Amino acid sequence: MKLSVDFRVYPWQAEAVATLAGAAARDRLGHAWLLHGAAGLGKHRLAETLGAALVCGLSARHWAESLPATLESAEAPEVLLPDLHRLMPLPDKQTIGVDQVRALIEQFGYTSHGGGARVAIVSLAEQLTVSAANSLLKTLEEPPAGAYLLLVSHVPGRLPATLRSRCQRIALRAPGREEALAWLAGVEPGRDWARLLALSSGCPLRAVRYAGMDMDRRDAEWSVALAEALTRGRDLSAQVDGWLKEDPAVFLSWLEGQLEATLLALAGGDVEDTGRDAGALPAALVGHPASALFRLRDGVRRLRRLVSSGANLALGLEAHLAACRRTAGQGRM
């Protein structure tokens, strides 16, 4: 049976494709790769198309040369092949367990269905438990013939160093603002993508997701609530719980972006370059000492890396906001 596979990737992934093709041309396409970068850049899609190419017997170099076009939609077609395996947290779990890894290793021991390579994509690899990571490490140290592991991670620093060191790495970066806006205009002409792209830290696929989440309304509501939380002595515990209840990753990303824009404004930079309106920045943030905002931003960044880790994000964010509020109070004394 002939399989039809869509190998297209996103236009801003050209550099990553060239890296993979170059490694293949030098006969240095290793058995393990770590694809990492911010959420919303299409890392999983890149892993799927590379994995499909290997399963179909197409070298990475020929795969890169045969790409017919780039994806013009955020809805990437799913690749279904019997020798392309996927590993990710189960629906009711926040981690990838050792039993899942052992099952994958067992599958790798079987003969390929199509006589080609066997490929496993580990999505959200930073959520491997310690036992699961150690089990996977043994496979990386002694990989079966014709088997490839593609690890995809938003936060590669949370992976054990021993695991990272055995992978070739590709860092996906956000496209330039104009390139991203041009692609988004093709997804939905006429929408104000500049603001959504800014709220998405320049990641186009995250901007598409935000388009369906009424982020303009959330942005306005969160800005008001943040100002009140930092200036009026409101109960931070209840406020933080409300912010993080629905989607902590979205709120923490928004908060980090607000802090970055505010710090840029305090330094005399052009906030409009970020897609935000300088006049819309919460006055409570602008009125804080830059040192306090830097500490708050760094704290928010650390919390973002802990999303889905099981850590108490609300307690951490409450502590960071309380410290920022105390610093502002001392500065006005």
Image (spheres, helix red, strand yellow):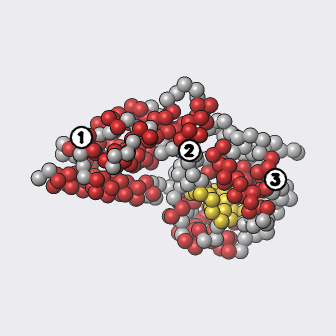
Residue at far left of view:
333
Residue depth check, mark 2 versus mark 3: number of the one nearer the observer: 2
Q: Is residue 181 left or right of residue 293?
A: right
Residue nearest the observer in this picture, 81 or 299: 299
CA distance for labels 3 and 1 = 57 Å
Residue nearest the observer in this picture, 184 or 45: 184
CA distance for labels 2 and 3 = 27 Å
Circle number at residue 62: 3
Instruction: Give the SS element for disc 1.
Output: helix
Q: Which residue is mark 1?
A: 228
Residue depth check, mark 1 versus mark 2: number of the one nearer the observer: 2
For residue 61, above or below residue 180:
below
**Mark 2 vs mark 3: which is more N-terminal?**
3
Task: Give the amino acid type for the residue marked by disc 1 in the picture.
Answer: Glu
Q: Which residue is mark 2?
A: 176
Task: Give the amino acid type for the residue marked by disc 2 in the picture.
Answer: Gly
Identify the residue at image location x=54%, y=69%. 160
Residue nearest the observer in this picture, 34 or 65: 65
**Mark 3 vs mark 1: which is more N-terminal?**
3
Residue at far front of view:
268
Task: Give the amino acid type for the residue marked by disc 3 in the picture.
Answer: His
Residue nearest the observer in this picture, 46 or 265: 265
Q: Mark 3 near mark 1, Cβ–Cβ under 8 Å? A: no
**Mark 1 vs mark 2: which is more N-terminal?**
2
Whether residue 86 appears in this view of the structure is no
For residue 73, above or below residue 297:
above
Instruction: Give the SS element for disc 2.
Output: loop
Circle number at residue 60: none
